[in-house]
Amino acid sequence: TRFTASDYALLLSYGRQLPVPGLALGGTAKLIYRHVGAFAQAFGVGVDLTLSYRRKELLLAMALRDATSTFTGWFMDHDKLRIETPDSVFNESVARDLELRLPSLELAAGYQFSAGQHHRFWLGLDLDLTFDGRSQVLLHARHLALDPRIGFEWSYRNIVHIRAGARQWQWYVDYDGSRVLSATPSLGVGFTAWNCTLDYAIAAPALVGSYRLSHMVSFAYQFGRPFNDNFH
């Protein structure tokens, strides 16, 4: 049986400059709604904290994701999940459950440069550090896992943005027993005007035999100075 899975999030962010030139502090409150087929839905809440430092074309940032841990409560429909056969019962579930996402640390570096008056480029590298010992990521130790991400953006007049990147670098075991490195490439486009930004991205897991695509749409509004005053 095929079904769809959708995730929705409302992000409320606040940031401000610190007395040290180029240093800024911020945070984001996350309200989450998840919907899986006709048999499960969830509601969650969490907080992220960020610290960034900008010097000319270089940007360094650190984000403590799920700083308070993110709690998500799941609600399942027994009847729609349960499948009975003459000799077996499948998909037994509880009516309610709690998902806990532990804190993780993200380190990022970005560099921007211009080509002419209206064209700007951005190169970025993220390192996502988790402490639950996931072994499928690119680099891992006993309790520490390192998941790198790379990205590129071209911006015209800071109105039109074209983006490309790769994430979820993972080792997996192929059918013949060999280890294969895979990644999830993504492409995106964004438009910025009148303090509003609309973004769309598509990602394709590069695992063998997987042709499912992920679509991500986001909308942001900035209070105060318009986006177009500054490359971001």
Image: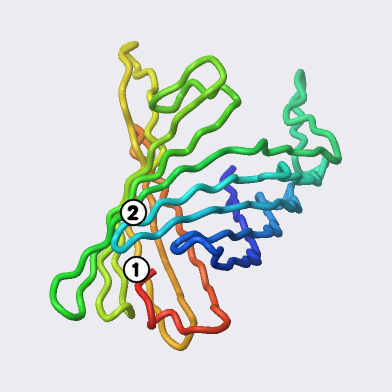
Q: How many marks?
A: 2
**Residue 106 or 74: which is nearer the viewer?**
106
Q: Label 2: how many residues lie within 10 Å, few (<14), some (14-19) or many (20+)?
A: some
Query: Which tag, 2 or 1, sits closer to the chain's start?
Result: 2
Question: Can see residue 142?
Answer: yes
Q: Which structural element holds mark 1?
A: strand
Give left or right: position of 187 versus 87.
Answer: left
Give left or right: position of 114 versus 137.
Answer: left
- Identify the residue shown where x is 33% and y is 51%: 124
Question: Residue 158 lies in what quarter of the image?
Answer: bottom left
**Quadrant in the picture for the N terminus:** top right
Residue, disc 2 = 110
Do callouts 2 and 1 mark residues in contact (Cβ within 8 Å)? Answer: no
The outermost residue toward the bottom is 194
**From what the image shows, is residue 153 above or below residue 131?**
below
Question: What separation in Å lies between label 2 and label 1 (alpha carbons)?
Answer: 19 Å
Question: Residue 17 lies in what quarter of the image?
Answer: bottom right
Q: Amino acid at mark 2?
A: Gly
- Identify the residue shown where x is 27% and y is 62%: 112
Residue, disc 1 = 189
Image position, residue 54 (x, y; %) = 40, 60
